Image (tube, rainbow, N blue to C red):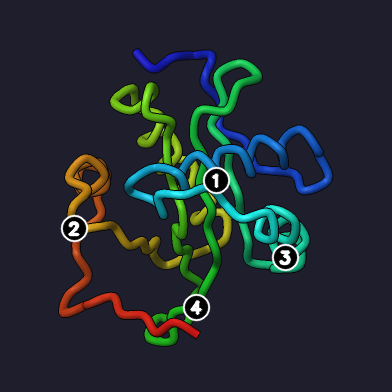
Amino acid sequence: MPDPDIEIIRVDFDDADAVRQYLDMLDAYALDPMGAGQHLSAEVRGRLLDDLRQLPGAHCLLARRGKSPIGFATCFTGYSTFRARPLLNIHDIAVLPEWRGQSVGRRLLAAIAELGGQLDCCRITLEVRADNPGARGLYESSGFVPAPCSLFMEKAL
């Protein structure tokens, strides 16, 4: 049975406590080996809130048990030209190590799916590291499948 004390909330960028918790969760993820392996820089922490606040398609979620954050997700809306509808991309999603395997990630994904429905999105997208079998298993068991013929690429600027 899911822990009834765990809630998923949308981050209100005017709520200083929620913003601090979100930044702390993002920093914990950045420090994780599946993240960047190092803390967020002071510059990033200093400007991220204002940047996210100005992006109309930014959606940040927190998983909390009581008042303590235990996971988070950062999503951005995009647009599918082939379907002429918005889509929702999960850019970041993570759960604190001590809470993994306790359905927190599954609850975050369910909240993201609900948000996507509210936004009339045609699909939810994400990328996952090939060397992260735990996350891949969670996503697959939640209905995510590899996009056909896709390869994620990047170019640093």
Where does the image place residue 154, in percent across and percent down from the top left?
36, 80
Q: How far apart are the alpha carbons under marks 1 and 4?
A: 25 Å
Q: Which of marks 1 and 4 is in front?
A: 1
Q: In this view, does 106 lie to the left or right of 69?
A: left
Q: Which amino acid does label 2 sit on?
A: Ala
Graded by Cα atoms within 10 Å as few (under 14), some (14 to 19) or many (20 or more), the crowding at tag 4 reads some
Q: Which badge, 3 or 2, is on the more N-terminal residue?
A: 3
Q: Mark 4 points at which residue?
A: 79
Q: How far apart are the alpha carbons under marks 1 and 2?
A: 21 Å
Asked whether disc 4 touches disc 3, contact meaning CB atoms under 8 Å apart, the reply is no
State the SS at label 2: loop
Q: Mark 3 points at which residue?
A: 51
- Identify the residue at horizontal 25%, vertical 57% (top origin): 129
Q: How far apart are the alpha carbons under marks 1 and 3?
A: 15 Å
Vertical placement of residue 153 versus 129, above or below: below
Closest to the observer, 45 or 147: 45
Where does the image place residue 84, in percent across and percent down from the top left?
47, 82
